[in-house]
Amino acid sequence: MNLTYIIGTVTAIAIMIVGMMFSSSGGQFVVKPSQITNFFDPSSILIVVGCTLMVVVASFPSKMLKEMPKHFGIMLNTKRFNPMYYIDQLVELAQVARKNGLLALEERANAQSDPFFKQAIMLIVDANDADKVRSILNNDIECMSARHDSVAGMYERASAVAPAFGMVGTLVGLINMLKNMNLSGDGGSSSIGTDMGTALITTLYGCVLAHMIFNPIASNLRTRDEEEVLCKMIIVEGIMSIQSGENPKSLREKLLTFVDQNQRGDNAGGKKGKAPKEKKKK
């Protein structure tokens, strides 16, 4: 579970709500819970939230939009991609190949739940040229990363659009305020406060949507992409080394360079990486 995202988002919202309830009275800060209603405006919600979502719908294909729940699952799962699991698996494959040959890896390939890992093993079992194997696998990684970039781009697009519609709401509120002003007589207008409130609250909603909702989602999706790309790079390097007949011990040392020192320390102590959960494409 991605606790940092949950803690950060929930805490940020809580701090904002508490800040909305503070009021200065006689040089002292007092808490007025009733003030929270000042920041609720149906017109602002309709303009900012509704228009932002509709622009996203208009900008991206329905297939990508339908997979939004899946995107949240991927974002919240920090244990989906475990480099140490793949390193352990590749070292075991290298040991099997060294004893029984590459053809003995076919059974191991069929037992893999990761389609990319299975494909990589089968490519060397089928005795393909090393350059061809690397080209196919690298192309798979590039295409996957491009798809992931499009998904993260959808949330970044929403993040860019939300403040813009906040400004649109501000203009709507100011226009209504000016239109309703009565410059004759005492020059007052009973709707100035309401219209001015809509003008300012829409800007608030736009900033909150962009920087507290959509931006963190896009950042977390890009982080998951980097983790998956790392695991697949480890698979490519490991498979190429197995095909060339590299020693399992040397293979482990080579693959450990892909991960940080803390993870290497766990592995040196004999702690094997846990199998990641079955992946779902974005």
Image: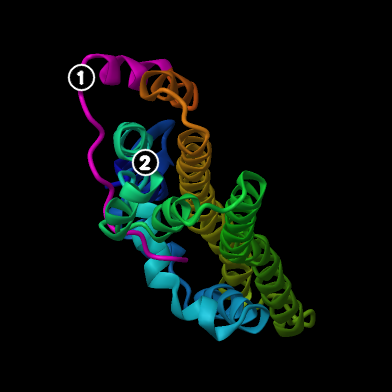
Q: Residue furthest front?
A: 100
Q: Which mark identifies residue 194? A: none
Q: Quadrant of residue 11?
A: top left
Residue found at x 39% / y 56% = 118
N-term mark: 2 or 1:
2
Q: Is residue 232 magenta?
A: no
Residue 10 drawn at (x, y percent): 33, 49
Residue 270 - label: 1
Position of 225 relative to 163 (above/below): above
Task: Identify which residue, 206 or 108, lies in the foreground.
Answer: 108
Q: Magenta stretch: dominant SS?
A: loop
In the image, 264 versus 40, the foreground residue is: 264
Question: Can residue 190 be seen in this snapshot?
Answer: no
Q: Looking at the picture, how far across and down is residue 43, in whole percent?
A: 53, 80
Report the residue marked by disc 2. 101
Instruction: Describe residue 276's horizontal placement relative to residue 40 as left or right.
Output: left
Q: Secondary structure at mark 2?
A: loop
Residue at horizontal 36%, vertical 57%?
114
- Which stretch did the figure color magenta? 261-282
For label 1, count other residues whose C-alpha is less than 10 Å away and answer few (under 14), some (14-19) or many (20+). Answer: few
- Indicate the amino acid at tag 1: Gly
Relative to 2, is 57 on the left or the right?
A: right
Question: With 108 as the anchor, is 174 left or right in this view?
Answer: right
